[in-house]
Image (spheres, rainbow, N blue to C red):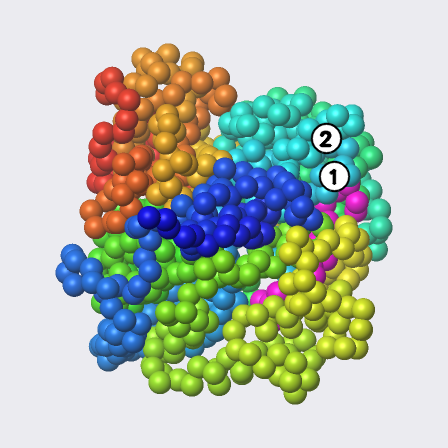
Amino acid sequence: MSSTHDPVQVHRRTCPLCEGMCGLKVATQDERVIAIRPDPDNVFSRGHICPKGTTLGAVHHDPDRLRHPVVRDGTTWREVSWDAAFQRIDELAQGVRRRHGPKAFAFYGGNMNKGGFDTSRYMMLMVRQAGFAQRFSSSSVDQLPKNVSTFLMYGDMWKMPIPDIDHTDLFVIVGGNPAASKGSIFSHRDVMGAIKALRSRGGRVVVIDPVCTGTARAADQWIGIRPGTDAALLLGVVHVLFQEGLVRLGHLEGLVNGLEEVRVLARAWPPERVASFCGVEAATIRALAQEIGQAPRAAVYGRIGTCTQEFGTLASWLIDVVAVLTGNMDQEGGVMWSTCVAPHLKLTPPYPTDAPLLGPPMRVRGVPGVLGQYPASCLAEEIDTPGAGRIHGLVTSGCNPVLSAPGSARLAAALAQLECMVSVDLYINETTRHAHVILPALSPLEQPHWDIWAWPFSLTSGGHYSPALFPRRDRPPEWQVLARLGSIIGGNPHADLDRLDDEYFGAMCDQLGVPRAVAFAALPSHGAERILDLCIRTGPFGDRFGERPEGLNLQAFKDQPDGIVLGHAPSQGAAAFTTPSGRLELAPAHMLGDLPRLEQAMVAPAPCLVLVSRRQLRSLNSWMHNVEVLVKGRDRCTLQIHVDDARRLGIADADLVRVQSESGALEVPAEPTTDIRPGVVSLPHGWGHGQPGTRQHTAAEHAGVNINLLSPARLVDAASGNAVLNGIPVQVVRIGDGLRASSISHEPPAGIDAA
C-alpha cells in the first residue's frame, strides 16, 4: 500500500522575531514545515541566521498553541466559536461599563505585536475604538528613555539614531549586547560579523557594561561599569570633550540649540568626580573621551542597559549629546537615521511636537503619564487599589507582563481581581491564564510579513514581503478581530467593520496628502495589505499612484521574493528636526532638571551587591521557551556572580543560593565567573514558567526563576517612568548543594535594608 504526498515546496520569508530580519528558506510538505534554513539569496541578510529563526515551524505546530478562542469557566477552559467569544466579551464589558463606567478599561501591549502583519497596523484602531482610559506597554519596561530623549531633542519620539557600524572607525557600545540580541533598535544583517570586519580594517570596539558579555569578549576593550552610573560616566566624557577642545558640530553647525548650556553644566563633571561612583578610573574615562573625540568617525550606541536603570533617560540623552559634540550625528560612520521604503510612522500622526511630554498623574502613586502611556510597573496597584478610577477591565496583546514587568507577584494577584480580561495571544501563559477570554493570535507562518519595526532602524533602505504560508480561512481576518474587539470594549458591539476600516484608511490618505478617491480606486480591498501598499507608494521610492511611473509599489516586492535593497541612507541635515524651533535641542529643560537627582545618588551609600538582568541568544523575552530545541541542554537560568564575591560568601559552582531584594526572594543555582564586575550578580530575563493554570508544557519542564520577583515596582527612572531592572540591591546567601532552582518565594522578605 503506497501513500501520496504533496511535493516539497520552498518558501522565502523574513524571520519576524527581531531586528535582524534574517531571510529564511522554509520547506513545507502536506501543510507541515519539514525544514528551515538560512536564505543566502535574501538581499538583506545574505544567509545570516540565529537559532530562533529555524524554530518557526516548531512554534506553528506546537500542540500547546491556541488555534481557537477559549473561554475560562473557573479554572477550566473551553473552545468556543468566534461569535461566542465576542458575545462573552460583550457580556463582560457591558457589566464593567454598567457598574464602573466607560473609563474602567485599560490596555497593555507587548513587543510581540510588532511581528503581526495586521496586528501592528490595526492595534491603533482597536485602541481608538475602545477608548481606554489608561494605556500600558512593554515600552516602559525597556525603551521609553530613548523615546523621551529623541522626542525632546529632535521632535519625534521614534527618531532614534542608528550606528553606522559598516563605515565607522570606533564603535562604543553602552549597555548593549548584540551577540545575544542581534541588535536592538538597530537593524543590521550581522552585527557581530560587522564588529569583526571593523576590527580587521583597523578600527576599535569598546563595550561599557557591568558584565563581560559575548559582545565584550569580541571587543578590544571592556569597561566594567557599576550598574546605573552610565550617565555620570558620559558627563565625564562630555567634560573632557569641552576641556580639550574636541567639540566640533560639523554639518550641524547653526542647527543646534543649547550648546552653551551643555558647555556650562559639563564643567561640574570632570572624570575625577565621577570615577568612584562609576567604578571606572578617571584615566579610563578621559582616554575614552579622547578616543571618541579624535576618531575620524565614531559611533556610540546605547541600548537595554542604558534604558532599564535609575538614570536611563539621562544616559540615553547623553549618548546622543556625545555624538553631536564630536560631529558624528547624522554622518556616515557615526550615527544616522533611516530612509524607509515604507515609512509607517507617517501613516498616523506621530505624537505631536507641541504636545506635552507629561500627562495627568496616576491616581495611586502620582506617577505622570509619559508620551501618552503609563508605566507598566503601576498596573498592579491601579487594579487592586479601591477607589474612583480603578481598573476593572483589561485587554492585553502580545505580552506576558507577569514575567516581564516589575512587581510580578502583586501583578499576578491583581489580574485575578479583574471583572473583564481579554487577551490576544498564542498561549495560555503566566499572564493570559487570568483572562476570561483569549483570542488566538496567528502564528508567524499563518500571516504575511513586512517588517515595520526593523526597517525604521536600519541604515539599509529596502524591503521584503513574505506571503502567508498557511493562510487561515476558518477565522475572521486579524484586522476584523481587532476592530471588533475595540468596538465591543468601547460599547459599540455592532459596528460596521468595513466602514471603520475605510475611515481608518481614509484618514491615513488625508495625513499623507493622497486624495481618497485615488487611493480607494487603486486599493479597494480591506485589511493591512492596502495600508502597506499606500505606505510604499507614498514613501521616498514610491510611485505616488502613477505620478512617478518608475517608483515602487507593493507588487514590485511581491515580484522579488528575495527582497529589494536600494542603498544606504543619506544624511538628513535640517530636515531631521521637527522640534518647535526647527533645530536640534541639545539641552532640554527636562533633562537638565534631572541632574540634581543624579548628584544625590552619587553621595548615597552604595549597596554591597546589585542585580542586573541578561539576555540569551536562544531566548526571546519569555515566549520561545516552549520550543524544546531552544531550551534543552544545560540549565541557563543561573545566578552569575564574580568568583571573588562567591568565595567571600562561601558559594561554589552550582550551589543553590537564595537571592533576596526588598520585593521578594528566589532560589537559583550559582555560576561563579570572572565575566562580571565584582559586586554585581546577574539573572536571565523571561523565565519563571510552570505556574498553575498555564499551558506550556515544555516551558514548565524548564521553568527557571522569574527575575521580576526581585524587581520592585516602585523603582522607576523618574524622567521617563521606565522600570528599573538593573542595579537592584540584593542579598545572596548559600543554602545548599543543588543543580536547579527549587523554590520561589512571592512574599516580600522582612527586614532587608534596600540601601
Asked if residue 241 can be seen in this view, the reply is no
Residue at screen point 38% across, 64% down = 107
Residue 443 x/y as whole percent: 42, 56
Residue 69 versus residue 626 in the image, above or below = below
Residue at screen point 38% across, 41% down = 627
Q: Are marks 1 and 2 in contact (CB under 8 Å)?
A: yes
Estimate the spatial distance between the alpha carbons at disc 1 and disc 2, rounded to whole Å: 8 Å
Quarter of the figure with residue 347 = bottom right
Q: Which residue in the structure is indicated by mark 2?
A: 197
Which element carries disc 1, helix, strand or loop? loop
- The magenta stretch spans residue 684: no
374 lies left or right of 418 = right
Q: Which residue in the structure is indicated by mark 1?
A: 166
- Which amino acid type is shown beneath numbered disc 1? Asp
- Which amino acid type is shown beneath numbered disc 2? Ala
The residue range painted magenta reads 331-351
- Number of numbered callouts drawn: 2
Which element carries disc 2, helix, strand or loop? helix
602 lies left or right of 325 = left
Residue at screen point 44% across, 71% down = 477
Mark found first going from the N terminus, 1 or 2? 1
For label 2, count other residues whose C-alpha is less than 10 Å away and answer few (under 14), some (14-19) or many (20+): some
Chief secondary structure of the magenta portion:
loop
Residue 126 x/y as whole percent: 44, 72
Residue 720 x/y as whole percent: 51, 53
Asked if residue 9 can be seen in this view, the reply is yes
Task: Locate the C terminus and report the quarter of the image it occupies.
Answer: top left
Q: Say which of 510 and 227 sits in front.
A: 510
Q: Say which of 753 and 106 sits in front.
A: 106
Q: Say which of 556 and 721 sits in front.
A: 556
